[in-house]
Image: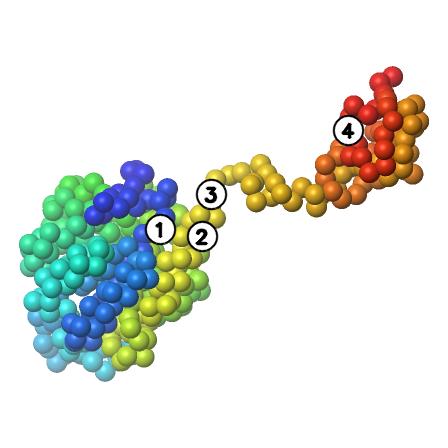
Amino acid sequence: MNPYITIDGRKIGPDYPPYIIAELSANHNGDINRAFQIMEEAKKAGANAIKLQTYTHETITMDCDSEEFQIRGGLWDGQSLYALYKGAHMPWEWHQPLFEKAKELGITIFSSPFDFTAVELLEDLNAPAYKIASFELIDLPLIKRVAQTGKPMIMSTGMANKEEIAEAIKTARDNGCKELVVLHCVSGYPAPADQYNLKTIADIAQRFEVLSGLSDHTIDNATAVASVALGACLIEKHVTMDRNGGGADDSFSLEPLELAQLCKDAKTAWQAMGQVNYERTEAEKGNVKFRRSLYVVKDINVGEAFTMNNVRSIRPGFGMAPKFLEDILGKKASRFVEKGTALQAEFIAKN
């Protein structure tokens, strides 16, 4: 397994701070200026990338009145697939100005293509990476086409079982993908934190020999921050200007201040992971005075015995460790020791 991948010059892996993707998705709500505003806020919050979704209602589904094409229950209850995606899709003519805006802001931009024509559009725009959405993980021809671009790939695994994930990864690798991150995901909108099973992140990395991360649909940051401690090197989160904006994805998206907090807390969690360490840290070194150690509490003359009356275990911690108290009781002093002196081994006379 590669220790990292690189997107647009930024290394992504366990040895680097978590890569944060702000998923714009349908949160433009039909207004390109709203999309621009979300991008500006994502950059300001510290996100590494903004991600789009490239499809139209014509390319992702069809206009059909049969029951199979109707949504029953959940966030989008009562709509047809065609109507949902007609309102939610990112117009293709917006892609170039959005890519230009990202360049102006200095934030990476790429997208999830949902068919071959979307890949062609994104290739024309020189997208630096590709994301395979959870529901497309079983579309092996699409994965094959994306892998053939030679660009880094990110895959979400929502709804997929082990066999389907393995097939998707094999298809990507067999068709030229050298840089891959696989994201654990629960395809619920929003998804309950208690169904996220974050321990799967480490298993994905080990089982499939890939870098792993998290696509998070919970409504706060706790799950995403916790994922860092379990090995997530990349976190994707939907972002909006207003969670109550009424758009298709607004209700389970982060607002700008929450995104900024995620960027900060995810990096802090990564820094806190550190390495296995049992040595005293820099932060602890100044606090040695708050430990206990052996101190002389009454003047002791040469040849006088150490007793419970003239030696005690007290703070600060500059003397011999308290565990040596029983060993030195009854032994003689090799020199005069003044009250308030930290007891040292050389103060004890040898037999």
**Going from the N terminus, do you reach mark 2 or mark 3 first?**
2
**Going from the N terminus, do you reach mark 2 or mark 4 first?**
2
Numbered disc in front, either 4 or 3: 4
**Going from the N terminus, do you reach mark 4 or mark 3 first?**
3
**Going from the N terminus, do you reach mark 3 or mark 1 first?**
1
**Going from the N terminus, do you reach mark 1 or mark 2 first?**
1
Relative placement, left or right, of 154 versus 268 is left
Evaluate whether residue 323 shows in this view.
no
Pointer 4 with pointer 1, Cβ within 8 A: no
Separation of residues labelled 2 and 3 (CA atoms): 9 Å
Relative placement, left or right, of 278 versus 55 is right
The residue at which mark 4 appears reads as 344
Pointer 2 with pointer 3, Cβ within 8 A: no
- In the rendered structure, find residue 18 and report the number of the disc placed on it: 1
| Closer to the camera in the image, 301 or 121 | 301
Q: Secondary structure at mark 2?
A: helix
Circle 4 packing at 10 Å, graded few (<14), some (14-19), many (20+), is: some
Pointer 1 with pointer 2, Cβ within 8 A: yes
Q: Position of residue 306 (x, y in %)?
A: 89, 31
> Given the image, on which type of amino acid does mark 3 rest?
Gly
Q: Split into 4 quadrants, where in the image is the C terminus?
A: top right
In the image, residue 250 above or below residue 152: below
- In the rendered structure, find residue 174 and report the number of the disc placed on it: none
Circle 3 packing at 10 Å, graded few (<14), some (14-19), many (20+), is: few
The residue at which mark 3 appears reads as 274
Pointer 3 with pointer 1, Cβ within 8 A: no
Q: Position of residue 338 (x, y in %)?
A: 85, 33
In the image, residue 348 above or below residue 40: above
